[in-house]
Image: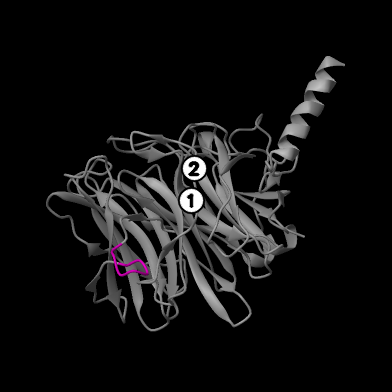
């Protein structure tokens, strides 16, 4: 009886103090993953899945490759990534890219952003206003403490010749004061046909993740900060980092984050107004590997989330999970199996590890494409027919 009275008193306090108890932004169905089968989590492969290597590590030249991100422009698929001779975030890091007409056969890698003195450059994603392809490059000055950076933009009309067009800016004209997340998504806003680009910025000082949005079609200006409160900061890094986002069936936007505090669960926040104001990020019951993930919507509006749902630091297997409404994920497919089905890294290097790291995804020409770094050495793409996923999401 005492326990019951305490619960009633607590409920009354929350009600009359105006506190709002919110349900989790989404959940996974019971027994979606089988932890007793760590190589596959008991999941089947989707019909028609294919895997292709975009770029294979070159001994003593580019043994480290990571941070792959996709985009489609003028009938071609592009992928950019960071590359260095041996170590992650080394002084010789550069950004490479390749292109493909069919998503399976890829061009030779070309330099997008060469290594530079006194800073490290990494892949920051893509965007286009229709005619021009924009490549976002994150720049991390060696002198900045705590570690952080800023964004530069390269522009090309043909995907081969590039011009530096400066820094993307806030609505007040000031440059973005942080490194940008690779996941750009466009959503309709209001009833006048406008659309809005939503992603996230890791702001200085350090890396404090916050949703940002712009109604400018190019993605080069007009950026605004969403209203969002980080749960905590440690050494200049917020608990919530490296997010992706999707739209639920009810119209709300959901941003999913890596949890730097190692709950090994996906964190998620919700916006009911197109990305302008966000709830605090909550710990969901969706397992993760404390790494980047990728989310989005299929053409029919159903939701996908790609990650390593190991519930540990293990970045294998690679899985795509599906939800019809974005509130419960109840279907999942294996993209790549781990364990003995994945060979170990071929080369040594700082922060090298076995697994399928930092997936980023794109729906293009009836396929869901997922780019990732295999063992932080090879840039690899797995594609799945959208029809296979759409049928399973129902």
Which of the image's four quarters has the N terminus?
Answer: top right
- Sequence order check: which comes first, mark 2 or mark 1? 1
Q: Contact (CB < 8 A) between labels 2 and 1?
A: yes
Residue at 58 percent across and 47 percent down: it is 268
- Magenta stretch holds residue 170: yes
Residue 280 visible within the image = yes
Cα distance between the residues tagged 2 and 1: 6 Å
Q: Is residue 86 left or right of residue 233?
A: left
Judge whether residue 372 can be spotted in this image: no
Q: Nearer the viewer, residue 221 or 54?
A: 221
Helix, strand or loop for disc 2: strand
Mark number displayed over residue 265? none
What span is in magenta? 168-175
Q: Give the percent coordinates (x, y) of residue 316.
A: 52, 39
Q: Residues within 10 Å of mark 1 (few under 14, many from 20)?
A: many
> Which quadrant would residue 323 be assigned to in this image?
bottom right
Q: Would you name the residue on which mark 1 appears?
A: 243
Residue 346 appears in which quarter of the rendering?
Answer: top left
Q: Is residue 309 left or right of residue 213?
A: right
Residue drawn where x is 68% and y is 62% of the image: 302
């Amino acid at each position: 009886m005492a326990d019951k009275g305490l619960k009633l008193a607590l409920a009354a306090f929350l009600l009359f103090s105006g506190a709002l108890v919110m349900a989790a932004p989404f959940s996974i169905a019971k027994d979606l993953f089988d932890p007793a089968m760590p190589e596959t989590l008991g999941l089947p492969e989707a019909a028609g899945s294919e895997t292709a290597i975009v770029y294979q590590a070159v001994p003593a030249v580019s043994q480290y490759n990571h941070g792959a991100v996709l985009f489609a422009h003028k009938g071609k698929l592009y992928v950019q990534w960071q590359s260095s001779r041996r170590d992650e975030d080394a002084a010789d890091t550069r950004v490479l890219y390749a292109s493909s007409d069919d998503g399976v056969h890829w061009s030779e890698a070309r330099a997008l952003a060469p290594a530079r003195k006194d800073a490290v450059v990494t892949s920051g994603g893509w965007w286009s206003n229709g005619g021009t392809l924009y490549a976002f490059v994150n720049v991390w000055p060696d002198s900045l403490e705590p570690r952080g950076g800023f964004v530069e933009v390269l522009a090309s009309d043909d995907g081969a010749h590039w011009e530096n067009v400066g820094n993307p800016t806030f609505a007040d004209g000031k440059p973005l004061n942080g490194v940008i997340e690779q996941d750009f998504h466009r959503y309709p806003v209001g009833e006048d046909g406008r659309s809005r680009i939503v992603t996230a910025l890791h702001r200085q000082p350090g890396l404090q993740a916050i949703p940002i949005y712009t109604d400018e079609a190019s993605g080069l200006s007009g950026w605004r900060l969403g209203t969002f409160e980080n749960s905590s900061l440690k050494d200049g890094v917020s608990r919530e980092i490296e997010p992706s986002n999707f739209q639920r069936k009810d119209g709300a936007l959901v941003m999913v984050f890596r949890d730097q505090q190692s709950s090994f669960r996906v964190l998620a926040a919700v916006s009911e107004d197109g990305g302008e104001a966000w709830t605090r990020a909550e710990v969901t019951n969706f397992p993760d590997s404390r790494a980047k993930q990728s989310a989005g919507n299929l053409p029919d509006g159903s939701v996908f989330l790609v990650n390593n749902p190991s519930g540990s630091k293990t970045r294998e297997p690679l899985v795509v999970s599906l939800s019809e409404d974005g509130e419960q994920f109840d279907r999942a497919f294996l993209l790549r199996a781990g364990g003995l089905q994945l060979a170990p890294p071929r080369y040594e290097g700082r922060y090298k590890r076995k697994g399928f790291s930092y997936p980023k995804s794109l729906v293009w020409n009836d396929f869901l494409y997922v780019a990732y770094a295999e063992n932080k050495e090879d840039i690899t793409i797995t594609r799945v027919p959208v029809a296979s996923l759409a049928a399973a999401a129902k």
